[in-house]
Image (tube, rainbow, N blue to C red):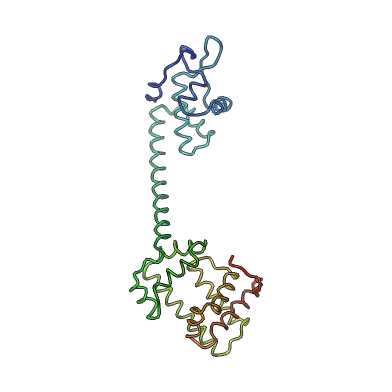
Amino acid sequence: MTSAAARFEPGPDDGADGLTVGRAAGLVGVSIRTLHHWDAIGLVRPGGRTWAGYRVYSAEDVARLHRVLVYRELGLPLAQIGRILDDPGTGAKDHLRRQRGELVERIERLQRMVGAVDRMLEASQTGMRLSPERQVEIFGDDWRPEWVDEAEQRWGRTDQWAQYSERAAGLSPADWERVAAETDALHADLVAARRSGVAPGSAEANALAERHRTLMSTYFDCTHAMQVCMGRMFVEDPGFAAHYDGLAAGLAQWLRQVLFANAAANGVDPETATWE
């Protein structure tokens, strides 16, 4: 490498044809211990000696050090770097071309990673990317867009809210329409089951509980323990209780019992379940 050779300036403590390990380490920006390790494994061995018998790095050795640093920065293991550098069919220009290609690939990979992080940041900041008017259009006239803000105030610091934010940001209006339709269908089936006397713990009731858990998992990974906590909230929170009891008298309490019984059938104690 021309730049490495240009900076190769032996000092008074170096040999006439090379740099001591300390000077070489300072030049390339690694520790003396690192150079000793690379020497021990045969990756970069100083090829000269001072008049006192100390081994020194020549300009070619320093250029090899810089090549090692570039390949290491690209994430290649030292053993692979050694094989690349010792390939008799690969010259200095070949190394530069290869390093350039590896760097371009890494830049592209990092750009994709940056894009993913940007999308996550956007998701955490925006969540549901629908206007209030579009929300009402999709979810019905009884939908209140401020419920999203209220939910964030209540659960915004949880891992589940982070999952919701990321997933919600990736849903298109068509996706939201599908989710709304599935929610309406589930509510209709819950009401029908309640009115027909379906018993909590029955196969039919457990199937409805699993449909509810699957629907919730659209937003975050919903466990049976979390469903128990939600069942409590459906009864104890005035807003949720009014919503479900508005669909059918006693639905909130019945749904709580359904979720509790299904959780118990799946090994979760409803009395001690926590949000996890």
Q: Residue at x 48, y 78 (%)?
A: 239
Please state which of residues 208 and 141 is positioned toward the viewer in this rendering: 141
Please state which of residues 120 and 62 is positioned toward the viewer in this rendering: 120
Left or right: residue 169 compared with residue 154: left
Please state which of residues 178 and 120 is positioned toward the viewer in this rendering: 120
Q: Residue at x 52, y 72 (%)?
A: 214
- Residue 150 is situated, as x and y percent measured from the top left of the image, at 45, 70
Q: Is residue 276 above or below residue 108?
A: below
- Residue 151 is situated, as x and y percent measured from the top left of the image, at 46, 69
- Residue 171 is situated, as x and y percent measured from the top left of the image, at 40, 66
Q: Quadrant of residue 276?
A: bottom right
Q: Residue at x 40, y 22 (%)?
A: 7
Looking at the image, the residue that sits furthest to the bottom is: 196
Looking at the image, the residue that sits furthest to the top is: 51
Please state which of residues 137 and 239 is positioned toward the viewer in this rendering: 239
Q: Is residue 276 above or below residue 210?
A: above
Q: Is residue 272 above or below residue 70?
A: below
Q: Quadrant of residue 52?
A: top right
Name the quadrant of the N terminus.
Answer: top left
Query: In the rendered picture of this protein, how many numbered marks are placed on residues?
Result: 0
- Residue 266 is situated, as x and y percent measured from the top left of the image, at 64, 72
Q: Is residue 190 above or below residue 60?
A: below
